Amino acid sequence: MYEGGFAELYDRFYRGRGKDYAAEAAQVARLVRDRLPSASSLLDVACGTGTHLRRFADLFDDVTGLELSAAMIEVARPQLGGIPVLQGDMRDFALDREFDAVTCMFSSIGHMRDGAELDQALASFARHLAPGGVVVVEPWWFPEDFLDGYVAGDVVRDGDLTISRVSHSVRAGGATRMEIHWVVADAVNGPRHHVEHYEITLFERQQYEKAFTAAGCAVQYLEGGPSGRGLFVGVRG
């Protein structure tokens, strides 16, 4: 595959695709400060290569990232100018501090395999919230909104690379089974092909709301959001 590794490829693809991380971070910051005007610290869970985190740093005085993938962290840290990115699992991390806001973007929460893991993740988020703190979660599709057999495809150019990504998503019980084909080409190496497989859980809206409530957070679901899947916004009591 691409010598820079998938984590760097991921970063370059979404940058080339034009994903507006700055606008998304600003939207989240507004939602947080509508509920907690004094919010100054933020933890971004499943921060990936840190692209949202870098934008959050322009909007909050104190930001930290949490990421499970060592490869993602390796790409993130050099780009973040000293912003801390810690390795941890969203289900059971313990940072021994609280934040005014906790975020989990890009539908990363869908990688929880069942309702028990979803509950664990929300409980972990809530444990790291100051009283009155705000948690913002971008969900995966709800079962009734998922399009079985959906195909997506994009080609972007970033510097010396041409990157093609084609995905096919099907329903597999209560989850999305996604197959992604990457073709990456440059002038020296020509095209290279790599295939990835993911399962992303199709949680019901009520399952998310139940997990927020069990974690001690009053929750509101807002339609739209960065990717059309909406946002859940919870406030710790």
Image (cartoon, rainbow, N blue to C red):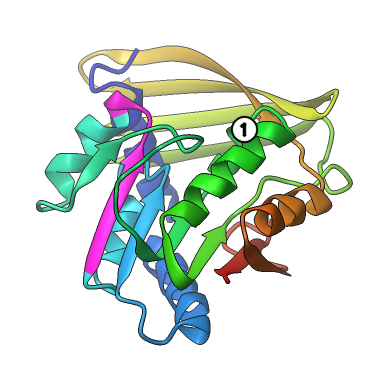
* Furthest residue toward right: 144
**x, y (%) of residue 158?**
30, 41
Nearer to me, 180 or 106: 106
Residue drawn 36% across and 33% down?
A: 88
Screen quadrant of the N terminus: top left
Q: Name the residue under label 1.
A: 112
Judged from the image, the secondary structure of the residue bearing numbered disc 1 is: loop
Examine the structure image and report whether residue 55 is included in the region drawn in magenta: no
Q: How many marks?
A: 1
Instruction: Residue 170: name its quadrant.
Output: top right
Side of 170 relative to 48 (left or right): right
Rendered-image quadrant of the C terminus: bottom right
Rendered image quadrant of residue 181: top right
Q: In this view, does 22 lie above or below 155?
A: below
Seen in the picture, residue 215 relative to 70 is either above or below; the reply is below
Give how far across and how far down residue 24 sits, in percent: 46, 66
Tell me, yes or no, if residue 159 can be seen here. no
**Residue occupying the point 67% across, 45% down:** 140
Q: Which residue is drawn at 48% across and 76% down?
A: 32
Q: What residue type is labelled 1?
A: Met
Which span is picked out in magenta?
62-71
Q: Image quadrant of residue 64? A: bottom left
The image position of residue 212, as x and y in percent, is 66, 56
Residue 162 in the image, given as x and y percentages of width and height: 36, 32
Classed neighbour count for the residue bearing mark 1: other residues with Cα under 10 Å, few (<14), some (14–19), many (≥20): many
Q: Is 178 positioned to the left or the right of 58 in the image?
A: right
Q: Is residue 226 above or below residue 182?
A: below
The reply to whether residue 38 is in sight is yes
Residue 69 among magenta residues: yes
Horizontal side of residue 79 vs 197, given as left or right: left
Return the residue nearer the eye: 35 or 156. 35
Q: Label the magenta part by its dominant secondary structure.
A: strand
